[in-house]
Amino acid sequence: MEDNINILVVDDSPSWCAIYEEALSESAYAVHIASDMTSALDCLNQQFFHVAVVDIRLDPDDRDNVEGLDVLQRIWELDEGTVAIVSSAHATADMLPSFRAYSVFDFVAKRELSPDDLARQYKSAAFIKGTIDKSGSLTESLARIDQAVLEARRISNNRKWLKSPFHLFRGLSSRHMQTDLGGAGLVELRPFLGRLCRPLFPWLHGSRNVVSILDDSGKTMAVEGYAWSRALGKPVIARVGRREHFEESVSQAPVGASWEGAETGEAILRQSSPHFEGLVCLVTNKSFDANFNPPPPRRAGTSSHA
């Protein structure tokens, strides 16, 4: 499965959204647009983004609106490797401590702004290393986003490899999963699951644990679990079983047995090894709001701009 680079643009200006969407799509990035804080937070709940380009003012009729800072705080709380770039005509010098606290990667000005003056006020020349006038240098702005993508891929890949692929199958430990499926051991099973599950990370679990598909004698042929893949922004079902019994498990219980009422499409991932077979299917009829809770923060703190 192709590893898409997801970019979130949070801006109340349709013009700037259109500019970013066109330019970034030409670079083969998957671009998502949010025009207000609520839709931005919904996007962050449902999907992992490598880069978020965030405006500070998200209500053109409210000069005091700084809801973009709340978006930056949520990105910081999730701590998944998303790299934030502030792109705004409404940033002020007193926001720089918040930008630093939320680990903002860069600042891009939409208007004439002297980065030297801001640096002298806050002695933060290194922090605002990429400050530019966006209206005069879109090319440079896009180059900074490309650099942010490289940083985000480095961080998110590290997080992905640190996460055990067994954790996708809620309620079944690695030892029990290997015992239930029998043979081959973790030496084969762990890398096999890694190839199958890591493209789905980060994920959110549903309310039910893994389901075992048994043969007539009560022996486990396969195990199945479901989750919301935040890498894809979609719900998925994953099934793993002994290779020689995998098709029999599908005949015994169609893919989707772990999630009542789930309708599945074709497999988007399929892996096999000498002893194991596995597949991942998208779920076509289940929504995020009705079935999952927003991801909890990996780190929590009070808002520094409150």
Image (cartoon, helix red, strand yellow):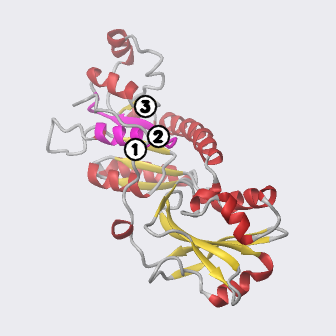
Which residue lies most toward the front here? Answer: 217
Closer mark to the observer between disc 3 and disc 2? 2
Give me the C-alpha separation between circle 2 and circle 1.
7 Å
N-term mark: 1 or 3: 3
Question: SS for tag 1?
Answer: loop
Give me the C-alpha separation between circle 3 and circle 2.
12 Å
Q: Position of residue 219 (x, y in %)?
A: 71, 80
Which residue lies most toward the right here? Answer: 274
User: Crowding at label 3, few (<14), some or many (≥20) Cα neighbours within 10 Å?
Assistant: many
| Residue that label 3 marks | 104
Q: Position of residue 220 (x, y in %)?
A: 69, 78
Mark 3 belongs to which amino acid? Val
N-term mark: 2 or 1: 2
User: Residue shown at 29%/25% (left/top)?
Assistant: 95
Mark 1 belongs to which amino acid? Pro
Of the numbered discs in the image, which one, if any, rests on residue 79? Answer: 2
Q: Nearer the viewer, residue 228 or 188?
A: 188
Q: Position of residue 22 (x, y in %)?
A: 46, 54
- Magenta region: 69-91
Q: Nearer the viewer, residue 227 or 211?
A: 211
Closer mark to the observer between disc 2 and disc 1? 1
Q: Position of residue 2 (x, y in %)?
A: 65, 60
* Cβ atoms under marks 2 and 1 closer than 8 Å: yes
User: Residue shown at 43%/49% (left/top)?
Assistant: 8
Q: Nearer the viewer, residue 39 or 260?
A: 260
Q: Nearer the viewer, residue 60 or 254?
A: 254
Q: Quadrant of the N terminus?
A: bottom right
| Residue that label 1 marks | 297
In the rendered structure, does residue 254 fall within the stretch colored magenta?
no
N-term mark: 3 or 2: 2
